[in-house]
Amino acid sequence: MAATLSQQLTALRRTRVWRSVFRGGNGTSNLDRALAVQQNLFLHLSSVKVRKRSLAFRVTWFLGTLCMGALMILVATGIPLMLYYHPSVPQAYADMKDLQSVVSAGVFLRNLHRWSAHAMVLLVFAHMFKVFYRGAYRPPREFNWVVGVILLIVTLLLSYTGYLLPWDQLAFWAITVGSNLLSSVPVIGPKVRFLMLGGNTVNANALLRFYVLHCVILPLTAATFVAVHFWRIRKDGGIYPGKDHKHA
Amino acid sequence: MSENEDAITKETIPDGNTRRDAFVKIGVGSLCVACSGAAVFGYDFLSPNVLYEPSPVANAGKIGKFPPDSVTQDAQSGIYIVHAAEGIYAMSAVCTHLGCLTAWKPELGIIACPCHGSKFGRDGVKLEGPAPRPLEWLKASISDEGDLLVDRSAPLSEKQFVRT
């Protein structure tokens, strides 16, 4: 007689290979389940146990999770897009057009990347407002609010740097306008603009710098602060339960 | 008990600091020196020394090709050549608001910016915002070959015409 799926999974967890990969939590007791989270590099950022009511939709509207979901879609679609994209003038524009019309599933990946980027900016703002209006930024969670502000800025910079990469008219003039806004900052503005663009005009250097920022520097920064953000949720006592549950 | 033990665990050096304090100071000090060095190095590295950008002096072509009472736009170099009653002058086509390229509208007789709707007269005077200043007049000269040269890096503080 065939074993049930859960029995097969239990058997799998008892195999030597499984136990060599996952150091703890191979059984089905509560302790084992807790260890499965606590002993895992990725899962240990999160809490071992959460209150049932903090998982209710109305508490968070799942906005933080949705932001993370958008970020994962952006990484998963962005990396394949890099394989067909040369950050050079004028090849970048031709590559973007090729992604739309020549590359199999290219238009799907590109549009998914673009819409997820728009969605992520929206979700990050919504998440911020939700946290603000619930008062979830208050101590001991005030530092995680600061981390959140850093992540908001990184998100906006990712959105801005990605905007140049299609190298079309919209991209060119948007970055021209944006970088001229920057140069109206007193004293350091023009110098920062020069360093950002790698020149006086939006040109090949600017495209390459924005590409490196968009694909390497900013994603690594985001990943670092996302890890701190998640870890601090656990360290600060889990998701804010609301003012009616002070000691929960 | 402490005098003897103190001598062992906290070996004092002349100015009263412990040896550990001294090493921490040396360590932090050298770290600061290394960080400032890295900052200077990084700033220098990120500033390009050679730019492959077009020359600021644009050649607008033979001086004779601009008919009287005309506005000629060269979108490639971002300049206007205007032949007015007083003579020929050159203006930057770059909007003084946020750097978009403006366009000459012959049917309206004005210069308009597509980005945020600024409008200018054919002499660059601001007709409508959000641009804060009129369009820049540029230094123009005639080369030995009879070409009109416009220096886009040299905005003029007062109007200057090239006589034909």
Image: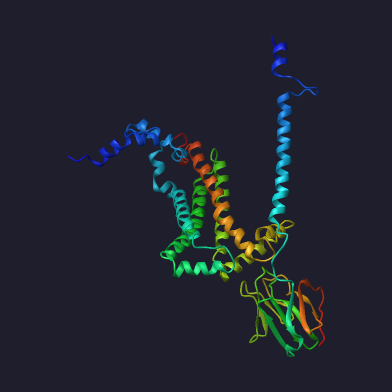
**Quarter location, residue B10:** top right
Name the outermost residue toward the top.
B1
Which residue is found at the position 41% from the left and 42% from the top?
Answer: A54
Give the percent coordinates (x, y) of residue A139.
55, 39
Where B30 sits versus A93, above or below?
A: above
Name the outermost residue toward the bottom.
B68
User: Viewer-proximal residue, A2 or A32?
Assistant: A2
**Does residue A146 appear in this view?**
yes
Left or right position of A186 against A9: right
User: Viewer-proximal residue, A133 or A193?
Assistant: A193
- Total numbered circles: 0
Say which quadrant the N terminus of chain B sits in: top right
Give the percent coordinates (x, y) of residue B93.
69, 76
Where A233 sits versus B104, above or below?
A: above
Give the percent coordinates (x, y) of residue A38.
43, 34
User: Viewer-proximal residue, A169 or B121?
Assistant: A169
Give the percent coordinates (x, y) of residue A99.
47, 66
Say which quadrant the C terminus of chain B sits in: bottom right
Q: How is the image coloured?
A: rainbow
User: Viewer-proximal residue, A107 or A120?
Assistant: A107
Left or right position of A111 against B162: left
Where B74 sits versus A4, above or below?
A: below
**Does residue B124 appear in this view?**
no
**Quarter location, residue B34:** top right
Where A121 sits versus B70, above or below?
A: above
